[in-house]
Amino acid sequence: MKTRKYAHKILIPGACVLVQLLFVPESYSSRVKEFDRSGQLVVTEKTAAELQPTYNIKNRQSEKIFPVPRPPFSEGIFPCSQCHAGMKPNPQRRVLKDYHEDIVLHHAEGQRWCTDCHNLLNRDKLRLVSGELIDFEESYRLCGQCHGDKFRDWKVGIHGKRTGYWNGDKQYLLCVHCHNPHDPKFKPIKPLPPPQRPGAARH
Ligand code: HEC
Ligand code: HEC
Ligand code: HEC
Ligand code: HEC
């Protein structure tokens, strides 16, 4: 058959292109001209991997670039599993009486309960709406689900507090270092009485 006869003419080059597509791009490299720290122009050979942008919004790993100090837990409360591993989880909305009596939810409490943020089965983890479990060191992602504008500002150092070098390593304070996750509104400061007029005591 005619097609049989000529098939190799298409298949062989086709296979070559496929092999190239699969393997070659990784070895592509390029010359990059840069100024080094002393201001000298240097030309370096960079591999394709090195030429990839280091920050990619679609890449979840990039959320981990925020180094934070230890979460502000009360003494001895963490790991939560020291008690909860042996307890039956109770998702009921209720007034807590046996423990955590100090926690009274005042944060959009009409729409949610503890277990919207705390994972019911593994209490050592927080829980995103997507069902993804995260560590307490990443609680900014939890807050960022609803406070996207503040999260955006926090990432670039406009909201919250960030310390370190302007062009180097930085440390971020977690949202919960400043805001109580259970009752985040800052209380208005009670005004002080007006100052006494000098001499008022004489009358
Ligand atoms: C908006 C999400 C959210 C809700 C709702 C929530 N929590 Fe939390 N909770 C957090 C975050 C975030 C932390 C971590 C604070 C930190 O890193 O120190 C935390 C910390 C805690 C801690 C440790 C407190 C401490 O003293 O260190 C306990 C206990 C706790 N939550 C219990 C509860 C209970 C009980 C409820 C329901 C009545 C609840 N949480 C509702 C987000 C939430
Ligand atoms: C010393 C023991 C202890 C530790 C540590 C502890 N809990 Fe609890 N927790 C309890 C008890 C007891 C209850 C039940 C309180 C009630 O029903 O009145 C409870 C209830 C809860 C509830 C309500 C839901 C449920 O299953 O009853 C949440 C949410 C919760 N704890 C979160 C946490 C988190 C988060 C931590 C760690 C940051 C933590 N707890 C650490 C003892 C503990
Ligand atoms: C499920 C959505 C949701 C998540 C998650 C959430 N919040 Fe909120 N937050 C709200 C809503 C809605 C309000 C306004 C209503 C209220 O204060 O009860 C609010 C109010 C606040 C306020 C007070 C704003 C004011 O008017 O003063 C602060 C601060 C805040 N949240 C911080 C946080 C922090 C920190 C976290 C993470 C621990 C967080 N929120 C997680 C929905 C959310
Ligand atoms: C260094 C402390 C600090 C950190 C860290 C911080 N905040 Fe705040 N936040 C504040 C202060 C102070 C205010 C009140 C003044 C203002 O509105 O800027 C505030 C206000 C807010 C408000 C209310 C704003 C309004 O419009 O009324 C929200 C919501 C909030 N913060 C969320 C967050 C979230 C989410 C994070 C983490 C991604 C965060 N904050 C981190 C200190 C902080």
Image (cartoon, rainbow, N blue to C red):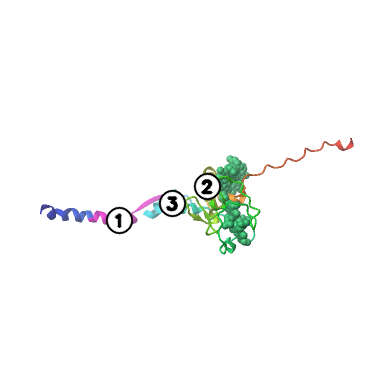
Does residue 167 appear to the left or right of 199 in the view shown? left
Task: Say whether residue 69 is visible.
Answer: no
Q: Residue at x 24, y 56 (%)?
A: 16
| Ligand 4 neighbours mark 2 (CB distance < 8 Å) | yes
Question: Which amino acid type corresponds to the residue marked 3 in the rendered image?
Answer: Asn
Task: Please state which of the two labelled residues, at mark 3 or mark 2, is closer to the viewer.
Answer: 2
Question: Which amino acid type corresponds to the residue marked 2 in the rendered image?
Answer: Gly
**In which image quadrant can residue 44 be found?**
bottom left
Q: Which residue is mark 1?
A: 22
Q: Residue at x 16, y 54 (%)?
A: 9
Q: Which residues are magenta?
A: 15-37
Judging depth in this view, the residue of 140 and 160 nearest the camera is 140
Label 1 CA crowd tier, 10 Å (few <14, some 14–19, many 20+): few
Split into 4 quadrants, where in the image is the N terminus? bottom left
Horizontal and vertical percent position of residue 2: 10, 52
Per the image, label 1 sits on a secondary structure element best described as: helix
Q: CA distance from mark 2 to mark 1?
A: 38 Å
First in sequence: mark 1 vs mark 3: 1
Judging depth in this view, the residue of 146 and 161 nearest the camera is 146
Question: Which amino acid type corresponds to the residue marked 1 in the rendered image?
Answer: Leu
